[in-house]
């Protein structure tokens, strides 16, 4: 950390800061400019709270030098991390597509959609059992019943299951049914949840909060990694800005930025990041072109009947077009779609 | 809700929308303009998902008419709600000051600060036992030990206790020790937590998420109210914007806006909303001038030793100045400071 | 426009609004809900200020129905507009690349870069003569001398010239030298400039303000169109958000949104929208994948010597890679790169 | 400036940076940490473009140390600047109120409002002659006719005149009629306008752009100061955020932040910063409580007839209440309202 003194800081003030740096077991390195003095606090990597210096007289600002995350950083692990999800590899060169309804609404709705997205080329099935909804009066998900339906859909299609977990108590039960535990955007900084998930063995899909910086997303991942679970997939799903033409603003920059800062897989959710089905395919193409390792897309047989997020859900036939176009873009940049997971037994729907 | 058709919508498309409106048990009211048709969906107050109409051909936009919250709205309860916190009334005309350290760090730190803020004129004591921290490597709070110290501080000073609860499991234990359960900004949309708190009897201090609109804050309050707990205090604590000169941007507009939309008490946290102690007093004055029912302020005996948020904590002597100035502003706008809560027995610190 | 009354509006208040609607020569259409009344103001397309109704007692909100722009809208002109720039067509199916230095710094710098980007496949040359700089102490551009160098570069390479104009007085002189007048992001709502440009015959490259909505960008275009100049190209160049990992946030959603709302060509500036050369190529690919009609990219022979924007400028060899990759993506989505403009005479550099 | 090297930077890379620092006539100061090297570039205050270092291999980031503005900084001039406006001092302890209509619409409208705000206690009259409007189809102001009416209102009431200037050519004519040249938010970075105004002798009211940081506002002021005009008043008028409950978000923090960073007077525009007349008075009180040196408020005899900004204009009787309340708050914090300017001759309206 660099402590930047005010231009009118006195020698005793500078000395006080130096002493304080040394109290923390760090070495103080003075840099005497024409205008002001800068004090470097040099030492091991133990984090020292910058706040400790901001109240000292004569201090103007404190600038952090080291990045606050370690296990998530590319310096920690220069090679890309890749995880096997029941037969599908994510984080490797081939691109992975996760698709399915926003919420599990019924057995037939889920199975029809599951088969449809599998036929279209999806590698994993998403579907919400526990739904975080802005209104207490909105549909909150079918809960455990939905988890059972997801397990059945997994049996039927062979697709690994991605579903959201909303609180620490839900982790064991969701982990019993699902391959990937999703942490929703609103819970990105729900630290008791991150800790509980960090103690599980499941792969995690960590969605970026709608107002979280890239660095905060990496710090949230660091919580999970530091608790022992190294299987974290990051997901850009749009941030909140002043623009109201779309539900969120897709931070497409975050894709190459994250790929340069971390070894973890990075995917894009073009459904939430746009909020309108008309724009989903264009942004899905853009995400792959920007270097994303995969996509998570909302698909519904009858979006106009969906109990949540109908406006941003694709009909299966539009998802087929999305897959074709995304595949062409993947190939154009030297990647490909991942191979389909092995089929399981067919059920009667 | 009003369904706005495209300018090129055909009569059969309009008819389909009308039919669908009627399927939901609503009445369709057509408004035929020169340029386009608008269809009002009129009926009882049951919420119908706007998404159901966005996929229908010929539909341009859907505009909601009713506000999505009911119990939190001023229409539901035109008079201001006020709650008694162990002898201190909040939400009534007199202004209430909550003060104390960001985190409980030790018995002496807490008690010294508690007595100092009481002497200065505070009406309640804040102090974190469970701390949500961006980094897994930062101090996470003393947990239950801190709760016991807070209870002791309450005994010693008579000040009601405000402390944060981070997960549903913590609700019973925190409720045993504290008068007011605080929901932190990062958990404003942690719905399992809101539901658990809604089932408790404690007063709740609900902080606005740094990315939440005023309407979303009211929807989060609605979760708690709808679960049976009507004792909710709202807290503006700064929102995230592009400006980096301060930690957050105090949304001072939110004070009069909330006072006009809801009957719930509204307070301001100038410590988090600025992030720099130099600006806390000016913004505290502004909050009261704008109509806030109270303030929550971070105070620490030695901010430069604080284990969290030192940069934005006031020393006790500066808090004394804040109280004096805030009182003058309160009187200027026809309010006053609330009377001090009754003293309890003095402990040896 | 729809005027939404409060739930407690009285019949005389409703009547007053109706009368006022009629005073503006509009027809009032009442929609009586269970909860409140909504009054539609129906009539010809003359814009009526919504503010006229907000002060009337009993009025809750006013919702606009018509879009505020007309000439820029796709409803006005369903087919894509395309303009010929000295042999290069922009707005048609083939994708157009504009490249060159941020500022014109010297004859050799400009000509070397011009030849390099032409070899790499660029279709037009950008270069700043008048530079809007945040600091009055920064390099402000070579002015008219730069315009002459741009004209020479045009002679030498055949590339049409794109350069910024900062004030109404500069329009005639810049129009004499350049093919395309660029309006910078900071001047997007400089209406005297927009009016002056609207009266010229040159093609215009209108950059989105860093805090302008898509609708405001279209309204700025409407200023130019309404003054008689129909040759407007829109340019997304990143918006300002809370994220600091990149200089701006590329609003990639704006590409498909604009393509659906307007007939005007839409291009992306990945240099400004990221601010870091490392991310420019990934975001250039994403822009084309999302449907942009072209790109404008900063290229400099020695970015570390550049007098402005060096951090986001590509070296020519990296621009070669960008072109190759962008071309592959264009082909993947069924488009291509535009053919090179005809060569002119070669100069001795 | 501090150049922060990557953790894997090699000694030759560090040497290259050092050499480059020295090429700019600066001294390089190495700080060798456990993890990485930091190179301070120390020397005189000449600004060196940070971009020159970002392309060098091994460089991670560059951190500026000096503030980019000088003449505007409090270090340059520790005492508050105060200017006399035709008998009214702004920037001194007493608080100044500027009020009047958004646009000058007619002689009677202007004079009636001018007398009303003077009676209520305003010290200066605002009124738009040239109006920057989002739509080319909206009322654009009466132009020079309005300037003449403003001059007449000045004669009649003795109130100094504040009016907006939109382009360099307008500066001489507006300066002939007005005491204070206003630079609107959309033109805050219109540098040709800032330069022209910097060469005039008039006092300037510089409004913060809705997307401008506090530092950028100070840089815009620096443009004017550096061109020789030292009479600059800064005005916070709300910034653009994700919140839609109000037209803008009043950045109340900016008041104490600016007062600490600069010696220039700082005022607040609660009309634009809220956009709703219901909130104007509360936010006006907050602005004074936060330390603003004055207010600029929109007042209209018949807001529902106003040709612009009616929704945020106060009726004269409400402005009377605002003045009373603001005066009480000013006194509470140890300030007062400035004395009224001397009356001039009365005209027949």
Image (tube, coloured by chain):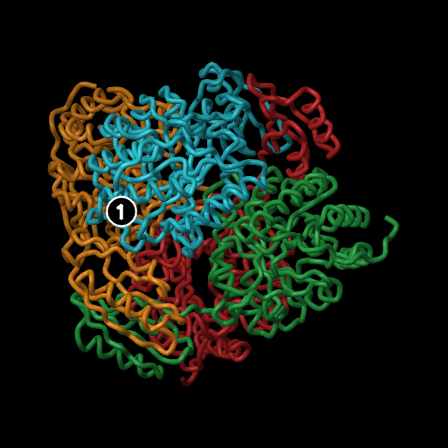
Chain colours: A cyan, B orange, C green, D red
Pick out the residue farthest to the right: C348
Nearer to us in this view, B246 or A11: B246
Residue C169 vs residue C62: left or right?
Answer: right
Looking at the image, how many numbered discs can be counted on the residues? 1
Chain name for mark 1: A
Residue B28: give x, y in percent of width and height: 22, 69
Query: Which residue is at 24% across, 51% downward?
Result: B331
* Res D5 → quadrant: top right
Query: Which residue is at 58% across, 69% downward?
Result: C224
Q: Quadrant of the C terminus of chain D?
A: bottom left
Nearer to us in this view, C315 or D10: C315
Q: Give the secondary structure at mark 1.
A: loop
Asked if residue D216 is positioned above or below residue B149 in the image, the reply reads below
Q: Is residue D316 visible?
A: no
Q: Which residue is mark 1?
A: A134
Nearer to us in this view, C311 or D305: C311
Asked if residue C98 is positioned above or below residue A341 in the image, the reply reads below
Query: Which residue is at 66% across, 52% downward?
Result: C337
Residue B299: give x, y in percent of width and height: 30, 32
Task: Rate crowding at label 1 as few (under 14), some (14 to 19) or many (20 or more) other CA atoms within 10 Å.
Answer: some
Residue B211: give x, y in percent of width and height: 36, 44
Residue A38 vs residue B340: left or right?
Answer: right
Q: Quadrant of the N terminus of chain D?
A: top right
Asked if residue C75 is positioned above or below residue A321 in the image, the reply reads below
Asked if residue D118 is positioned above or below residue D258 in the image, the reply reads below
Residue C143: give x, y in percent of width and height: 74, 57
Q: Is residue C262 visible?
A: yes
Residue B84 vs residue C151: left or right?
Answer: left
Pick out the residue farthest to the bottom: D348
Nearer to us in this view, C318 or A327: A327
């Amino acid at each position: 950390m660099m402590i930047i003194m005010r231009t009118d800081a006195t020698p005793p003030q500078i000395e006080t800061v130096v002493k304080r740096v040394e109290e923390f077991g760090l070495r103080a390195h003075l840099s005497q400019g024409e205008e002001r003095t800068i004090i470097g606090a040099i030492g091991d990597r133990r984090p020292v709270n910058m706040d400790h210096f901001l109240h000292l007289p004569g201090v103007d600002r404190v600038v952090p030098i080291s990045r606050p995350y370690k296990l998530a950083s590319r310096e920690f692990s220069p090679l890309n991390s890749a995880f096997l999800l029941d037969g599908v590899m994510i984080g490797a060169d081939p691109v992975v597509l996760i698709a399915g309804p926003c919420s599990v609404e019924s057995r037939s709705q889920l199975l029809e959609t599951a088969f449809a997205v599998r036929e279209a080329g999806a590698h994993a099935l998403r579907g919400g059992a526990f739904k975080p909804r802005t209104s207490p009066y909105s549909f909150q998900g079918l809960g455990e019943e939905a988890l059972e339906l997801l397990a059945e859909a997994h049996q039927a299609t062979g697709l690994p299951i991605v579903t959201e977990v909303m609180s620490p108590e839900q982790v064991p039960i969701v982990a019993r049914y699902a391959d990937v535990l999703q942490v929703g955007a609103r819970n990105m900084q729900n630290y008791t949840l991150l800790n509980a998930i960090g103690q599980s063995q499941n792969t995690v899909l960590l969605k970026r909060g709608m107002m979280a910086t890239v660095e905060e997303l990496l710090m949230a991942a660091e919580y999970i990694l530091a608790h022992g679970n190294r299987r974290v997939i990051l997901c850009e799903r749009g941030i909140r800005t002043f623009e109201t033409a779309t539900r969120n603003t897709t931070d497409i920059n975050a894709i190459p930025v994250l790929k340069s800062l971390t070894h973890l897989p990075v995917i894009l959710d073009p459904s939430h990041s746009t909020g309108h089905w008309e724009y989903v395919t264009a942004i899905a193409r853009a995400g792959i072109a920007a270097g994303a390792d995969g996509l998570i897309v909302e698909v519904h047989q009858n979006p106009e009947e969906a109990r949540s997020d109908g406006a941003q859900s694709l009909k299966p036939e539009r998802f087929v077009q999305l897959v074709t176009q995304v595949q062409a873009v993947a190939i154009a940049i030297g990647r490909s779609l991942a191979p389909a997971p092995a089929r399981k037994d067919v059920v009667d729907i």
